[in-house]
Structures are given as structure tokens and as C-alpha cells.
Image (cartoon, rainbow, N blue to C red):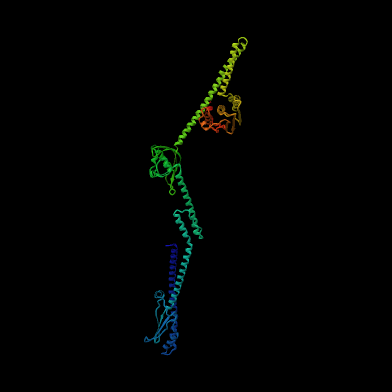
């Protein structure tokens, strides 16, 4: 049953009930009015007739009273709604009042007459020589009341029909947007969340349209968000697992299939203990208790078991799954990532850091040993060579004119001692440059470059020092010196270069060292095959201090060695800490 039909039916029922009530009230009022009218008319009639009968008896002579009364009744005809009958003393009917001509030929329905007709007695008025009967006839009054009620009912029926038609049309026009609303709801039920309702002129339907469109927007956004979340879960590189409070798996994404080897169809509905090693079950119980208490696990390094029995090192993050309606924890959401290679890398990195520290300690020890050897060579061997040279000089002077052979031998001893002295000082400079201890890094580098200029006058050596490099510490000083020393040695021996440039710059808390040449260059494979005391040694020295070592260049275009060292006073090199 449509809403329009129900509204019209309800309106009709109310109108009919109202009409019945009104008709009942009208009938009651009509009955009362007719009775009052009849009773009033009856009193007037009886008064009139009584007066006439009395006066006729007084005026007329004996025997003429009946004739006089009969003549009066014939002239009178009817008295409103009363039927008059005159009988003589022998009950012979002498006179009957004529029928009413008002609405002649029409009568009200018997049921209506029975409802409204009053019950009034027949009055017998005795007269001389006869009897006058007065009978009340309310049929015309009843007929008038019936006509009035018919008109009322006809007006109500006309009003009812007109109202129903009007209401039917108006409701039809007003409810026209209902079709659009129903169509929108049906399309949304089919999953067409992009559907929207138009604007309606009726405020109530416009409110429905606004609410519907807002709901559709929210549902569309929610569905899009759900699709994005589902896509993220499906395409995530991390294994995602959802299980209930009893540990039964309810979701298993493709990354989890790849990581553990279990297809989703094989593990969904199974216990999470299927991938948990036995020794990790207490940890699993503690994790479940924490999540039941609304806690969150951000990063937990643990182990899980694959389908083929292998155990993997994984990083696990978990959060409780909360029912949005009841607020109860109904499960857990876990993400797992394989960190087996990461842990190996960490171990390798720790081992590399330990090796670098060991290398730095060894280098520091080597430098200390070189310093000791250089000091011993300078103090012991140097003094001995100087003494031998002095003695040879004295002998040569004393035997210059007396013994030519001894004089020549003494001169040879002096020359050999001088050569040994120069060689020892060269070895001392190689072991430990004295300028580095007494003058600083800048002067030590200037001395080293100057020595290369003397040894190779056909090459151009340049040195550029920028910034304050006077208080860098012994470890940084010797590292920079050895790197420059190794670079210049390689250039002279292997590069076939005509020019070598050394640049040392201090920029804030960084020290940049660059050594460039215009020689034949060096390829990366050659750099990888370099010996421990070549490029590899320079790289290790730089990385031991937390620096960076890079090579730039191409065959035939020279080579640039670049080292960047951090200058952090909070970090004390192991060699200096030991010292």
C-alpha cells in the first residue's frame, strides 16, 4: 500500500468519522427541534380550537353549534402540522382536514422518520354534539430535516472528494522526489557509491538529499580508504598477519606467504603457534597479555619458523585489534620483516668497526715504533757515524803529507760516513718527519714537497694550505702526512706525470685533502687491486678516523685523491688515548 493511498485513506476515514459525528449531532438536534416545534404548534392549535369551540357554543343557538364549528373548520383547512377530524355524536366523520400541499408526494425514509419523529399523543377535544380529534403530523418537518441532512451529506461528500483529489495531487507532487531518493538508495545498494541526489524544492527532501549525499561521500571515501589499505596490505613487502584472541589466523597477506612459505588457504584458521618455535611460546604469551592490555609492540627482534622448518630472525610490530562497537580487544595485527641479512650486516659492520679500531691502534703503534726507531737511529747510529766521520777527518788531516795511502783511506772513510749519515737522516725522515713534531703539519708538508722538488726538478709540485691546521692532533697530522706522502710516491713512481698539486683545506669541523696529477690515471679495477700500503692503506687510514676516501679520474686524464676527515674534539683516537 503506497504512502499516497494510505494518506488518502486516512483522510477519508477521518472525514467520514467527522461526518457521522456531525450527522448524529444534527439528527439529535433535529429530533429535539421537531419535538419542540410540534409541541409548540400543538399548544397554539389547541388554544385556538378550544377558544373556537367555546365561542361557537356561546354564540350559536341550540343545534347550530356543530354547523358553526364545521363551517369554521372548512374555512380553516389545516392548522400547520395537525390533522383535524370532526365526528358527530354517532361517530360519524363530518370533517377531515385537507392534506398538506408542502412538498407533496415526497416522504423521508422510514428509518430517518423513526430516528427523528417525536411520539405525541392524539388529542380528543369534546364538543357539543360530537368530538374533535387533533393528530400531530410531523412528516413535513421530518422531510425538511431530511433534505437538510442530504444537503449536508452531499456537501461533505463533495468536500471529501475534492479534498482527496487535491491531497492526492499535492501529495503526488510533494512525494515526487521519493522516486529519486529510492532510486539513489537502490543504486547505492548495488554498490554505486558515486550516485548523488539533486537539490529539491521541499525543505524536508532537501535535508534528506543533503544527508544522503554526505553519507554517500563518507561511504565513498571509506571504501576508497579500505581499498587503499587492502592494496597496501596486499602489496606490502612486510608480512602482515591478523589473528583472534585464541591465536587463530584470519588474514595472511602475500608477503607472509613468500616469507614463511604457507599459502593463505593453508594457514587461515590455524594457530599462530604453527610459525612459532617452541622456545618462543612464553614470549608469544607475554606478547598476547600486553596486547590484551591495549599495549603496543613497536619493535621486537625475535625468531619465527617457516614451512620447511627454517628459523628466521624477524622484526615484529603488533597492535591490538579493537571492536569499534563494544571496545573489546578481539585480536592482534602483526607485521613481520626478515632481518636475517640485516643482523648479519650488523655483525659484519661491528666486526669492520672493530677491525678499523684495531687497524688504527696498529697504525698508532707503528707510528710510535717508527718514532722510537727514528730516535734511536738519530741518537745512537747518527752519533756513531758522526764520531767515525770526525775520526776519519782527523786521520786524514794528520796523514795528508806523511802517508798518502792512509790519507786516501781516511778520506774514503769520511765520505762513506757522510753518505751513511745522509742515508740515516733520510731513513729517519721516512720513519718520522721531525718537522711534524717540532713545526706542525703545514711546515712538515712544505718540507716534504720541497724534498720532492729537489729529487725531481723536472716535475712541478705545488702545495696549498687553507685554514688553521696547527692544532689538529697527532693522529690527524700523521694521517694527513702519510696520505700525502703515499700519493706523491705513487705519482713519482707510476703516474708519469709532469705536475702534482697538493691542497689541504679546513672548513669548519672538516679537513679536506686533495692530491691531483696530470698523469696516466688509474682505473677502478686497478684501485681495487692496490696493495695494502698503497691506495688501500690510505682508505683504511681515512675510514679509521670516520672519514671518506674517493678517487676521481680516467685513464690518460690524471687522478684525484680526495680525503675528507671530520674534526670532532669529542672523539679521541685510540692511539692518542693510549698515549
Between 409 and 234, the residue placed more toward the observer is 409
Query: Residue pushed farthest right?
Result: 401
Q: Is residue 483 above or below residue 118?
A: above
Does residue 186 appear in this view?
A: yes
Does residue 246 appear in this view?
A: no
- Residue 52 lies in what quarter of the image? bottom left
Q: Residue at x 47, y 65 (%)?
A: 169
Between 146 and 241, the residue placed more toward the observer is 241
Give the left or right position of residue 58, taking residue 478 as reference: left
Residue 108 position within the rendered picture, expressed as x and y whole percent measured from the top left: 41, 76
Q: Which quarter of the image is occupied by the N terminus? A: bottom left
Residue 104 position within the rendered picture, expressed as x and y whole percent measured from the top left: 43, 80
Residue 176 position within the rendered picture, expressed as x and y whole percent measured from the top left: 48, 61
Give the left or right position of residue 413, taking residue 16 as reference: right
Residue 268 position within the rendered picture, expressed as x and y whole percent measured from the top left: 39, 44
Between 574 and 288, the residue placed more toward the observer is 574
Total numbered labels: 0
Amino acid at each position: 500500500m503506497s504512502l499516497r493511498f494510505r494518506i488518502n485513506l486516512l483522510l477519508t476515514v477521518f472525514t467520514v468519522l467527522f461526518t457521522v459525528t456531525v450527522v448524529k449531532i444534527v439528527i439529535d438536534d433535529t429530533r429535539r427541534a421537531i419535538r419542540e416545534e410540534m409541541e409548540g404548534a400543538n399548544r397554539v392549535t389547541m388554544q385556538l380550537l378550544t377558544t373556537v369551540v367555546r365561542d361557537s357554543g356561546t354564540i350559536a343557538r341550540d343545534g347550530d353549534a356543530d354547523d358553526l364549528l364545521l363551517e369554521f373548520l372548512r374555512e380553516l383547512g389545516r392548522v400547520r402540522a395537525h390533522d383535524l377530524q370532526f365526528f358527530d355524536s354517532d361517530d360519524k366523520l363530518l370533517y377531515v382536514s385537507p392534506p398538506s400541499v408542502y412538498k407533496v408526494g415526497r416522504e423521508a425514509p422510514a428509518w430517518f422518520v423513526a430516528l427523528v419523529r417525536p411520539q405525541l399523543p392524539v388529542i380528543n377535544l369534546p364538543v357539543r354534539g360530537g368530538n374533535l380529534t387533533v393528530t400531530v403530523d410531523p412528516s413535513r418537518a421530518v422531510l425538511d430535516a431530511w433534505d437538510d441532512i442530504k444537503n449536508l451529506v452531499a456537501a461533505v461528500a463533495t468536500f471529501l472528494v475534492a479534498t482527496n483529489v487535491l491531497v492526492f495531487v499535492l501529495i503526488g507532487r510533494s512525494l515526487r522526489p521519493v522516486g529519486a531518493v529510492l532510486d539513489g538508495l537502490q543504486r547505492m545498494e548495488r554498490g554505486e557509491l558515486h550516485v548523488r541526489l539533486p537539490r529539491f524544492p521541499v525543505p524536508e527532501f532537501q535535508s534528506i538529499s543533503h544527508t544522503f549525499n554526505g553519507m554517500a561521500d563518507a561511504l565513498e571515501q571509506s571504501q576508497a580508504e579500505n581499498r587503499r589499505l587492502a592494496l597496501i596490505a596486499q602489496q606490502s613487502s612486510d608480512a602482515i598477519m591478523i589473528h583472534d584472541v585464541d591465536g587463530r589466523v584470519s588474514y595472511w597477506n602475500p608477503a607472509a606467504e613468500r616469507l614463511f612459505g604457507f599459502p593463505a588457504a593453508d594457514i587461515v584458521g590455524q594457530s599462530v603457534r604453527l610459525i612459532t618455535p617452541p622456545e618462543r611460546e612464553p614470549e608469544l604469551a607475554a606478547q598476547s597479555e600486553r596486547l590484551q592490555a591495549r599495549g603496543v609492540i613497536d619493535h621486537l627482534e625475535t625468531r619465527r619458523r617457516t614451512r620447511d622448518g627454517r628459523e628466521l630472525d624477524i622484526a615484529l610490530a603488533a597492535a591490538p585489534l579493537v571492536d569499534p562497537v563494544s571496545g573489546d580487544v578481539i585480536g592482534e595485527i602483526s607485521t613481520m620483516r626478515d632481518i636475517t641479512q640485516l643482523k648479519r650486516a650488523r655483525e659484519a659492520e661491528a666486526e669492520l668497526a672493530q677491525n678499523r679500531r684495531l687497524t688504527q691502534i696498529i697504525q698508532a703503534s707503528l707510528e710510535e715504533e717508527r718514532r722510537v726507531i727514528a730516535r734511536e737511529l738519530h741518537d745512537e747510529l747518527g752519533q756513531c757515524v758522526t764520531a767515525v766521520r770526525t775520526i776519519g777527518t782527523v786521520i786524514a788531516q794528520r796523514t795528508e803529507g806523511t802517508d798518502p795511502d792512509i790519507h786516501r783511506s781516511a778520506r774514503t772513510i769520511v765520505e762513506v760516513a757522510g753518505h751513511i749519515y745522509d742515508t740515516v737522516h733520510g731513513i729517519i725522515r721516512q720513519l718520522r718527519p721531525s718537522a711534524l713534531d717540532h713545526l706542525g703539519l703545514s711546515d712538515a708538508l712544505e718540507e716534504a714537497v720541497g724534498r720532492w722538488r729537489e729529487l725531481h726538478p723536472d716535475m712541478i709540485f705545488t702545495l696549498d694550505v687553507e685554514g688553521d691546521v696547527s692544532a689538529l692532533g697527532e693522529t690527524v697530522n700523521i694521517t694527513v702526512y702519510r696520505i700525502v706522502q703515499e700519493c706523491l710516491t705513487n705519482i713519482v713512481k707510476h703516474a708519469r706525470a709532469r705536475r702534482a698539486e697538493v691542497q689541504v683545506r679546513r672548513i669548519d669541523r672538516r679537513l679536506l685533502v686533495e692530491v691531483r696529477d696530470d698523469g696516466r690515471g688509474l682505473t677502478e679495477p686497478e684501485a681495487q687491486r692496490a696493495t695494502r700500503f698503497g691506495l688501500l692503506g690510505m682508505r683504511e687510514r681515512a675510514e679509521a678516523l670516520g672519514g671518506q676516501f674517493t678517487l676521481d679520474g680516467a685513464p690518460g686524464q690524471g687522478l684525484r685523491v680526495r680525503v675528507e676527515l671530520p674534526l670532532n674534539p669529542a672523539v679521541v683516537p685510540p692511539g692518542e688515548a693510549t698515549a
